[in-house]
Amino acid sequence: GMEDQHAAVLTLLDDLSEATQVVQGATDVLGPVCPLVGGNSSAAGQFINEQVGSDALAAALLRTPAPIGIGVAHGWKPAGRPMVVTRSVANVIYELDGQPALEVYRRMWWDESSEFDAERFPDLAATHPLGLPQLGSEYLIRDASLARPDGAIELAAPIPENAVAHMMSGNKDELFAAARAAAQRAVDELGGRPPAAAIVFDCVSRLMLLGDDAVTEIDHIRDVVGHETPLIGMFSFGEIAAPPGLGLAAFHNKTVVVCVLAQE
């Protein structure tokens, strides 16, 4: 029967604009009993059975008598005092602490000796995302993707107005440590059983930062789940999983999610 089954819903999205609402809606239906795990392919289209879908949600129920472990980590640390998002609409932040958002970024990170160049903003923001503090959990990361001429910043996912946000920073070693931590958390949930298979959703922005070292990040995960354990995954535009300590799934950026199935 169902009572001796473990379950998770493998969730593949193809829509960046509504991703947070879709994850919230699915979580409202499934609740904490059946965790979501997955990623966003961002307008690449999806094959679902015989059809190709776009702006779609594909979901598959994983059900097994053995435990399923899910680990989430990112490795970004707060690099400044908390700020309030004083004006935002959907995924655009206009003001932080009552100041134009881009100006706040520029003051914090830009070398005064070089002229501010909005074209180079994505490179700067790639290593300095925003983090939203979560109750009893890691920060939820929001990728800043574009500087607008009006001094606003576009993000890869929405941030609610009046949210508290930190500028974050990180380096390769911290990203590698996070990949290991995500894998370890997943394995720790298997109740001592050996892993049967692992599924990884790793943010494409981590791939861009790590470059050739992205292979090293996967090696760190394999060190934990076992190099012989079958492993599959994707680089995603946003990841879906419950942050540590919270039962309900969220939409993440710049994060690595590891799902491990235990041997029966």
Image (cartoon, rainbow, N blue to C red):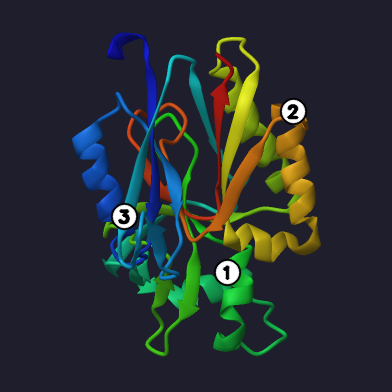
Identify residue for label 1. Answer: 125
Identify residue for label 3. Answer: 57
CB under 8 Å between discs 2 and 1: no
Q: Is residue 49 above or below residue 191?
A: below
Give the number of callouts.
3
Name the residue rendered at 78%, 42% in the picture. Answer: 219
**Residue 115: image x %, image y %?**
65, 90
Is disc 2 placed on a helix, strand or loop? loop
Neighbour tally class for label 1: few under 14, some 14-19, many 20 plus, Cα within 10 Å: many
**Residue 68: image x %, image y %?**
49, 23
**Residue sitting at the far front:** 50
**Residue 227: image x %, image y %?**
78, 32
Spatial distance from mark 2 to mark 3, Cα to Cα? 31 Å
189 on left or right of 220? left
Of residue 168 and residue 143, the one placed in the foreground of this image is: 143
Given the image, on which type of amino acid does mark 2 rest?
A: Gly
Given the image, on which type of amino acid does mark 1 rest?
A: Ala
* Circle 2 or circle 1, nearest the eye: 2
237 on left or right of 94? right
Name the residue rendered at 41%, 36% in the picture. Answer: 242
Given the image, on which type of amino acid does mark 3 rest?
A: Leu
Spatial distance from mark 2 to mark 1, Cα to Cα? 34 Å
Of residue 39 and residue 46, the one placed in the foreground of this image is: 46
Picture quarter with the C terminus: top right
Name the residue rendered at 59%, 47% in the picture. Answer: 233
* Circle 1 or circle 3, nearest the eye: 3
Residue 78 in sight: no
**Residue 47: image x %, image y %?**
41, 60
Q: Earlier in the sequence, mark 2 or mark 1?
A: 1
Is disc 1 placed on a helix, strand or loop? helix
Identify residue for label 2. Answer: 226
236 on left or right of 250? right
